Image (cartoon, grey):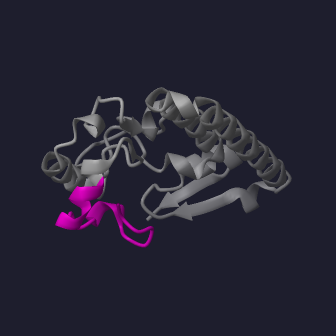
Amino acid sequence: LAAASVDPHRVDPRPNLILPLNRADLLLVNGLALEDAWLTPLLVAARNGRIQRGAPGWFDTAGVVRLLDAGAGRIDRRSGDVHPGGNPHHTLDPRNGARIALALAERLAALDPTGAVGYRARGKALARRLDAFAASWRARFDRLAGPAKRLVAYHKSLDYLEDWLGIEEIATI
C-alpha cells in the first residue's frame, strides 16, 4: 500500500487505498503495529471481513519470528519512536525471512487450496535460499576481528541484523 521510499510511520491513508483493501483476500502486515495509525481507518472503510485483524486473510509477519526488545526498558515517548511489542525491523534478518516465507506459504495454501502445492514448494525454495544466504554472510562476518564488528545505529533499527551477524551495537542515535 505504501512505496518503499515512504516512511512507514507516516503513510498518508488516502482514499485510493481503500479499493485494493476491499478486494484483497490477504493482507500482509510487517510492522508489528507500526502501521496501525494509518491502516486501521483504511480497514474500517474497506469493509472487508476477510482481511481484518484475526481473520484468515490477516497475516502478521511478527507472529512467526522471535521478537527482540519486546517490553525492553522504559516505554514512553521520551525515548523517541518506541515499539512496546518488540522491535519491528525483524525482516533485516534473512533467517526471519525464511520463517515468514514458510508461514506465508501455509497461509496462502489455506486460503487457496488449489494452489497449495505450488505455494508450499515456492515457500520452501525461498526459505532454503534465505537460510543459505544467512549462513554464508554469517560465516563472512565471523572472520572479522572484534573492532570491525561494532556499529552505531540510528533508531534501534538494526537489532535483528546485529543478532544475525554477531555485530555489537556500541551506541544508538
Residue closest to the far front: 114
Q: Is residue 97 above or below residue 5?
A: above
Residue closest to the far right: 143
Percent position (x, y) of residue 41? Answer: 15, 52
Asked whether the viewer can see residue 61, the reply is yes
Tell me which corner region of the image, top left, top right, bottom left or bottom right, holds residue 115. Answer: top right
User: Is 116 part of what is drawn in magenta?
Assistant: no
Percent position (x, y) of residue 19? Answer: 24, 57
Residue in front for this viewpoint, 76 or 5: 5
Percent position (x, y) of residue 88? Answer: 42, 47
Residue in front for this viewpoint, 16 or 166: 16
Q: Could you tell me which residue is drawn at 35 percent across and 29 percent down?
A: 56
Asked whether the viewer can see residue 69, the reply is no
Q: Quadrant of the C terminus?
A: bottom left
Tell me which corner region of the image, top left, top right, bottom left or bottom right, holds residue 149. Answer: bottom right
Residue in front for this viewpoint, 110 or 152: 110
Tell me which corner region of the image, top left, top right, bottom left or bottom right, holds residue 102. Answer: top right
Q: Could you tell me which residue is drawn at 63 percent across and 32 percent down?
A: 120
Position of 113 compared to 55: left or right? right
Q: Quadrant of the N terminus?
A: bottom left
Position of 127 compared to 84: left or right? right
Task: Give the residues in magenta.
Answer: 1-20
Position of 52 compared to 110: left or right? left
Residue in front for this viewpoint, 149 or 66: 66
